[in-house]
Amino acid sequence: MKFHRIIVPTPFYVGPVNVYLIEEDPLTLIDAGPRDDTSLEALRSGLARLGYKLSDIERIIISHAHADHYGLAQLIVEESGATVYIHEWDASAVSADMDYRAYRVLLTSAGVPRETIDQMEAGYEKFRGFAYPLVRVEKLKDEDEILFEHESLTVVHTPGHTPGSICLVRTSNRMVFASDTVLKTITPNPVLSPDPIDHTRRFQSLGEYLVSLARIRQIAPTVLKGGHGDDVTDYDEHFHRLYRFTKERQSKLLSLLPKNGATAWEASTLLFPNAHGYHRFLALSETVAHLDYAVAESKLVIERKSEQESYRLP
């Protein structure tokens, strides 16, 4: 399988995103970069260096529903007629009729002040402006096969970073296109999301993410090609490092909780006192994820009062 990495700049703190061109029939992109003029020019230039144009793309596989990964996909579709694929659990998040109300409920239950929820919604809408909504997608499921003329990639559903995050595995040599599930120098954030099956519930992102990491380990990958930065070539060491980081972060959080308990919002300000702007939402996301995981491990109990939830030691 012949493929190429195209490094596409983004206007985001995370830095450039990796877009992969699979130079097989049908000509396929894995991810597309954000809706941004500089990003679009870099993608066009990267394809041109390989002898292609956007109009040559026949298929786009979206690894997960974040704007830096799917933002340009609809524009490519309009130039090429390509078909877009995304996991069924992330499909609604890339459509034009995405509704923030479920997030408002989750943020309220986390104890976020109403004016802050309004600010977060405004930030969310601004972030969505970096992506063209997708008019039509084909939905993927775990273990689907992405077929090429002579080879295939296997879809491995790896929920955590988003509910519908996927990796693509080339089984012949156990190479993995891991997107943001495994990154060399960044610990992926388990982003606060409604559960894809029941939108009134919170998706258990950290627990799901740890299961996904263990599942990847069972594949015994030879190399993982991430959505940002360089390849990961020693996954076993990376796996243990992520588990240590998770345990240390959770221990720190538990040590900061007041004896009478705290909401997720209050806990996030203790764990990440210097987070501001969009990073305040990411801080809350990570805090909620660790609190929920601690509840699942019986290290905390959760109490519900009116619309809010609080966490305390048992």
Image (cartoon, rainbow, N blue to C red):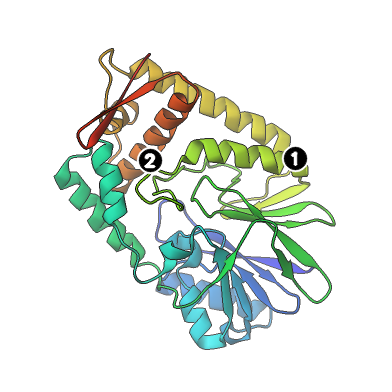
| Residue 87 found in image quarter | bottom right
Label located before the other in sequence (2 or 1): 1
Expressed as whole percent of the image width and height from the top left, the position of residue 31 reads 56, 66
Circle 1: element type = helix
Q: Looking at the picture, how far across and down is residue 106, in whole percent?
A: 30, 44
Q: Which mark is residue 117?
A: none
Depth check: 63 or 108 in front? 108
The image position of residue 102, as x and y in percent, is 31, 52
Residue drawn where x is 48% and y is 64% of the image = 91
Question: Badge 1 local density, few (<14 within 10 Å), some, or many (20+)?
Answer: few
Determine whether, in the image, residue 135 is placed left or right of residue 100: right
Q: Is residue 218 visible?
A: yes
Q: Residue at x 50, y 74 (%)?
A: 73
Name the mark on residue 285: 2
Q: Amino acid at mark 2?
A: Ser
- Note whether 141 is above or below 133 in the view shown: above
User: Residue at point 39% right, 19% down?
Assistant: 254
Q: How many labels were placed on the picture? A: 2
**Would you identify the image quadrant in which residue 59 lies?**
bottom right
Q: Secondary structure at mark 2?
A: helix
Above or below: residue 181 compared with residue 36:
above
- As drawn, is 55 to the left or to the right of 260? right
Q: Residue 206 in the image: x percent, y percent?
A: 50, 37
Looking at the image, is 280 positioned above or below residue 272? Answer: below
- 59, 305: nearer the viewer: 305
Residue type at numbered disc 1: Gln
Please give the residue where the numbered disc 1 appears in the rendered image: 218
Asked if one can make out residue 9 in the rendered structure from this viewpoint, the answer is no
Q: Residue at x 55, y 51 (%)?
A: 180
Location of the N terminus (image quadrant): bottom right
Within 10 angstroms of label 2, few (less than 14), some, or many (20 or more) residues? many
